[in-house]
Every structure is written in structure tokens, then in C-alpha cells.
Amino acid sequence: MAAGAKKKTAFFCQECGYESAKWMGQCPSCHAWNTMVEEPVRIVSPGRSGGGLSGGSLAGTGSTAHRPVTLSDADLSEEPRISTGYSELDRVLGGGIVKGSLLLVGGDPGIGKSTLLLQVTRNLSQGGHRVLYVSGEESLRQIGLRARRIGGAGENLKFFCETDLDVITDAALAEKPEVCVIDSIQTMFNPAVAAAPGSVSQVREATGVLLRLAKEQGITIFIVGHVTKEGTVAGPRVLEHMVDTVLYFEGDRYASYRVLRGTKNRFGSTNEIGLFEMRQEGLLQVENPSEYMLAGRPLGASGSVVTCSMEGTRPLLVEVQALLNETNFGYPKRQATGTDYNRVSLLMAVMEKRLGLPLGQQDAYVNLAGGIRQSEPALDLGIALAVVSSYRNRPIDDKLMAFGEIGLSGEIRAVSQAEHRVQEAAKLGFTTVIMPRANLRGMHRPEGVEIIGVAGLGEAIDAAMG
């Protein structure tokens, strides 16, 4: 560009990446308000075709990569997966890492994203895989101190502290790693884009360069993404559409547990979760989440009931706690932690209408112990039993587990995968299970467990409390 020439700018939506020549109050693509920001448009230098990936350097990817083919010409064989060394992470990924995939890992600051990826890269390098860890936020000394704390790093693991994507892609083409980690995408910049690192243009263009590098060179790339105060990955929403897998690290940074949840996965289910525990030596996987979530449960206390929810193919036993107290005000207070507040209010209205319980004069507090948030309808019966137990101040058997969806007429409706829930309860020593009667047909009943099928809420309460 000639000296003194006016730089060309455009307006981009921070939510979806929509580009416009003028500012608009509402994005015409995603209809979000006040998300348009002005940034310089991309200027491509003559010698580069996308941040360091020249056309000739990627010519060895196969002759069919640059011409249309029919589906019969495509290789449809199952891609071999690489184990991360953590069964919990492999479960969320659908069985392991897929070669040439692009994965986005988001989470709150200090939640453990860098620690988890450093442990994964250590496991991969010790398994003989070549790994490149690129950090744009920490120095080599800082990474070394963390690596020493979690148990060191393998010989096949190399570190690179750089933010220039041209330099990073050249290093990746030279090193030819099988797995590469970019920590984080908001610190990377493409010299061909005249915008600051972390801006909408830079994040979008940098992700595009990494996507091409992953697909054409067969390198699996993990991208660490910062999150906004709303809990979404900072930058344009198109970032999540470009990658193959989106993983979110959830949990309180001051608590010991961490939940890894997949919200998008082109190679597996998006309903799976992995549970980790943060310790001094790093993140340790929790292989039996149900037992972990029920640890420290009070015995013989009213308002405490164990129920079961499904996370993908995994049954997860959680404790529902309820506390009811006569209100001192004209309007009773309702509070729900870990589950949907509106669902709790609906269930209390059903119990007041169908069972005649005077809950309108009671302050109600419902909590799912352990901090994991659940909203599955199968939790309804557990919540209802906990509320009635607290209202009557009568404890429910500690070896009883209940699940089922409650309708507005007070009926107990069938739920999915009931047999898996019962088997999980039997494995943890529960002797009585209250469940929908509609799920009993053709179900295998484990030995030592009494299964009580109920059709209505009143029948369930009588079975649980006599």
C-alpha cells in the first residue's frame, strides 16, 4: 500500500463474523444488537496465500484434494483414533483423537485448560507421538515449572513460544508433528491482517489458517479459547462453526472438580461429559463420577434423595437436597441450585394441586449436591420426593434411588435408558429403586434390588415414605 494511502476498513459482527461496509445497530445475520465493530480489512501480501501456507508447500496432500470427486472415490474407512491417556477425555471425544481434526477448548480463566492440554501432550509424547506445544501467553520457564509439577514431559514434546502465525506454520511444516496445541487463539496474529490480536478479523483469519494446516497436513490441532463473561468463546461465533469439536471446561475454579463437556463433535456424541479433579500434581480423572458425587452424603436426613440422570451413555447418580420452611413474608421464596428454577416451581404447583399439600406458605430451597448442573426431566421424581420429605420432616431410606418424569396431572412418565440407571444404582449398593411403571416391561432386574414401578406421584410418595 502506498505511503499516505487511506486504509480500507469494514464493520464485523462480534457474534457471527458478518461483514458490512457500514455500521448497523443490529446485525442482519444473527440479529444481535450493538455487536458491529470497525476493523481493517485483510490485506494479502503477494508472496503469501494465507499466513505462511504457500500453494507449493501443501501439494503433497494427494491429487484428489484439488478436484471434485464422487462419494465412491472417497475413503470411507474408519479413522484410527489416538488415545489421550485419559479415558474420560477419550469418552468426550468419541473414542480418542481423530487425525487432522481441529478442536476448540474453552473455559473460565484458571479452570485448568492449559494444565489439561499439557498433561495430554505429555501422555501423547510418552506414547511415541510427535507433539508441538505453541504458547502465546507464557514463557518457556513458566511452562517448564508447570510441566515439572505435573510430572515432566516426554522427548517427543517440543515447545514454541510465538504468536506470529507465519512463523508457527513454517515451524509446523518443518517439525511435522502429529498433534499441535495453540494456547491461545486470541494471542495469535496473522501478518496479512491489519488488525490487533484478539479482534474479530484476527481470530477468524487465524482459525482459517489453522484449519487449512490441520486438514491438508493431517495435524490434529487443539485451540485454547478465552471465554466472555457470558461463558461463550470470545471472538466471532463463526469460530465454533469452523472447528470439528468444541469442548467446554466447567466448574468453580475454587472447587476441586472440573467437568469437561462436548457441545459440538463431528466424530462422536455431544452428550458425554468427563469429570476431573484438580490436585497439586495436576488434573486427575474421576472414573466413577456417581460414587464421587455421593461422597459425604448425610445419612438419615430429611429432604435428601438420590436420583439418576443420563449424560450421553453414562448414568450419573446425584443427590437432590430440599429444605422447606414456613415463610415469614406474604410471598414464599423459591431457589434452585444446579437445576431449572422454573421446573422446580412447576413441580411444587403440581404437588399442591394434585396432592393437596399447602406448599404456598413454604419457602423452598432445592440443591443438586456436587455442583453439576442437570436439567433432565428424569430428575422430577427425585426433586418431588425430596420436597415432600423435607415438608414432613421424615427421612427417606438411604438405600433408595428414584427417577421419573412428572406430568401436570401428577402421572409418572417413562424415561430413556431406565435399565442403565437401575444397574448403576445396583453397582453402588442401592437396594430399592422407584421408577416409572411404563419402563418395567421387558427390563432385566438385577439381583438384590427391589424395583417398584409407580404410575402416579401419590403412589410414589407412599412407596418411598410408607
Image (tube, rainbow, N blue to C red):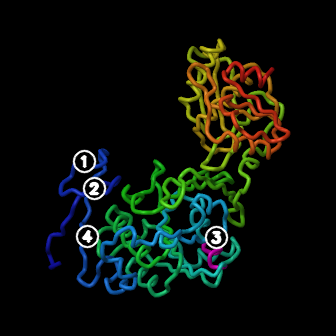
Q: Which residue is mark 2?
A: 18
Q: Which residue is mark 1?
A: 28
Which amino acid does the dot numbered 4 rest on? Arg
Which amino acid does the dot numbered 2 rest on? Tyr
Q: Which residue is mark 3?
A: 119
Q: Mark 3 packing: few (<14 Cα in 10 Å), some, or many (20+)?
A: many
Where residue 83 sits: x, y (%)? 63, 70
Assign a secondary structure to mark 3. Answer: helix
Callout 3–callout 4 Cβ contact below 8 Å: no
Q: Residue at x 39, y 85 (%)?
A: 60
The question of residue 388 being in magenta is answered with no
Relative to residue 169, is residue 384 depicted above or below? above
Relative to residue 16, is residue 199 depicted above or below? below
Q: Specify which label sits upstream in the sequence, 2 or 4.
A: 2
Assign a secondary structure to mark 2. Answer: loop
Where residue 326 sits: x, y (%)? 67, 17
User: Distance of mark 2 from mark 4, alpha carbons?
Assistant: 14 Å
Which corner quadrant of the image does residue 334 belong to? top right
Which amino acid does the dot numbered 3 rest on? Gln
Q: Specify which label sits upstream in the sequence, 1 or 4.
A: 1
Report the front residue among 29 and 97: 97
User: Distance of mark 1 from mark 3, alpha carbons?
Assistant: 43 Å
Q: What span is in magenta? A: 119-126
49 sits left or right of 218 in the view: left
User: Distance of mark 3 from mark 4, alpha carbons?
Assistant: 36 Å
